[in-house]
Amino acid sequence: KQKQIINFGAGPAKLPQSVLIQAQKELLDYNGVGVSVLEMSHRSSDFIKIINKTENILRELLNIPTNYKVMFLQGGGTGQFSAVPLNLIGLKEDRCADYLVTGTWSQKAAEEAEKYGKVNIVHPKLDTYTKIPDPSSWTLNPSASYVYYCCNETVHGVEYNFIPETNGVVLVSDMSSNFLSRPVDVSKFGLIFAGAQKNVGCAGVTVVIVREDLLGHALKECPIVLDYKVQVKSNSLYNTPPCYSIYIMGMVLEWIKNNGGSAAMETLNKQKSSMIYDIINNSNGFYVCPVDVDCRSHMNVPFRIGKKEGDETLEKEFLDGASKRGMISLKGHRSVGGIRASLYNAVTLEDTEALADYMKEFLKEHV
Ligand code: PMP
């Protein structure tokens, strides 16, 4: 039976219904093994098959070149804010890294990196996280160990629609909230990481894709669980991995594959986000999205209601009405307020239409 609730949460977020049903079916007895994946040794042949299958589908979906390694780690995106500098800032003697800070998540990553080396913010500081500074204003350090950016800022709804040019310096990207929402040329990156709990699974596992030649440069104080070389060498099984989350991810990846892969996800995601942005653009300022048009996220659509800085009474009324219609988790991040509709892969066109219809109705009632 189709669920009555539509979840627009920013993560953990909606999962494909078919994946939940499959997980339910297999909860007590996985594939006739007689135990649940929740109870299985991470060293059992059954679990090894699960983790290998998950990696293989991921490689296929993103066309990951053979000189890239894949890890399934714990510690979330936040763990990677530390792991990236701990493993990569020592690539060059100077221990400098370039950061693009376009929202909360890249800001946190930059602050964490400062513990381990010198951080250079490559562009003039932004007053508001509503834009991506033009590359002509960036001052990249040619001897930086790496250049870091967050491909989609989940809180502010700011997404890169281009890959930064680093002139040969290793490029690192946090793709937590737009991973597999569109195709990506992995070969342009030194490292990509993404927490699973938005587009590719449930909380607990973070995917890291790293170019082989970047391994082996960890600082000596790097905790062993965060050491990429150690984790790669043991196939993410140095210690107990987040087994169940890896299993769920495998099923979500299979679902993406069966639904046309990353290119099909992109088409659908563009259709969904345009539906909402069109309403905002045509509302005569009733709905306001503060983000520059060319970097508006296809994943997280933030907007205010009533006026530019938001009319909180109207916004509360909007959220209450949405909730009565079964649409939940539309409240903006506590740091910015307003509304945020997250439209990850598992959110359907029909789900988005329900929101669009409600937005049109709410507009009509109030102007
Ligand atoms: N990066 C991005 C882009 C995120 O959206 C988030 C979480 N919402 C994080 C990093 C942090 O992830 P975690 O909570 O898994 O540490």
Image (cartoon, rainbow, N blue to C red):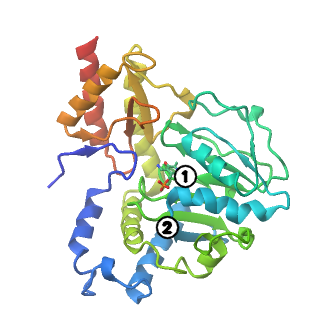
How far across and how far down the image is residue 145, in percent? 78, 57
Q: Nearer the viewer, residue 182 or 263?
A: 182
Q: Is residue 52 visible?
A: yes
How far across and how far down the image is residue 156, in percent? 50, 36
Relative to 200, say whether 338 is above or below: above
Examine the image and state in which quarter residue 62 appears: bottom right
Taking 260 as reference, is 347 left or right? left
How far across and how far down the image is residue 160, in percent? 59, 41
Q: Residue at x 75, y 70 (%)?
A: 217
Residue that sits furthest to the top in the current view: 367
Label 1 CB-ligand 1 distance < 8 A: yes
> Looking at the picture, which amino acid does disc 2 mark?
Gln
Relative to 341, say whether 18 is above or below: below
Taking 137 as reference, is 84 left or right? left
Q: Nearer the viewer, residue 227 or 114?
A: 114
Q: Nearer the viewer, residue 210 or 257?
A: 210
Q: Is residue 66 visible?
A: no
> Looking at the picture, which amino acid does disc 1 mark?
Met
Disc sitting over residue 74 in the figure: 2
Disc 1 crowd, CA 10 A, few/some/many (<14, 14-19, 20+): many
How far across and how far down the image is residue 17, in percent? 26, 57
Taking 123 as reference, is 323 left or right? left
Residue that numbered label 1 is attached to: 175
Taking 35 as reference, is 273 left or right? right
Image quadrant where one finds the N terminus: bottom left
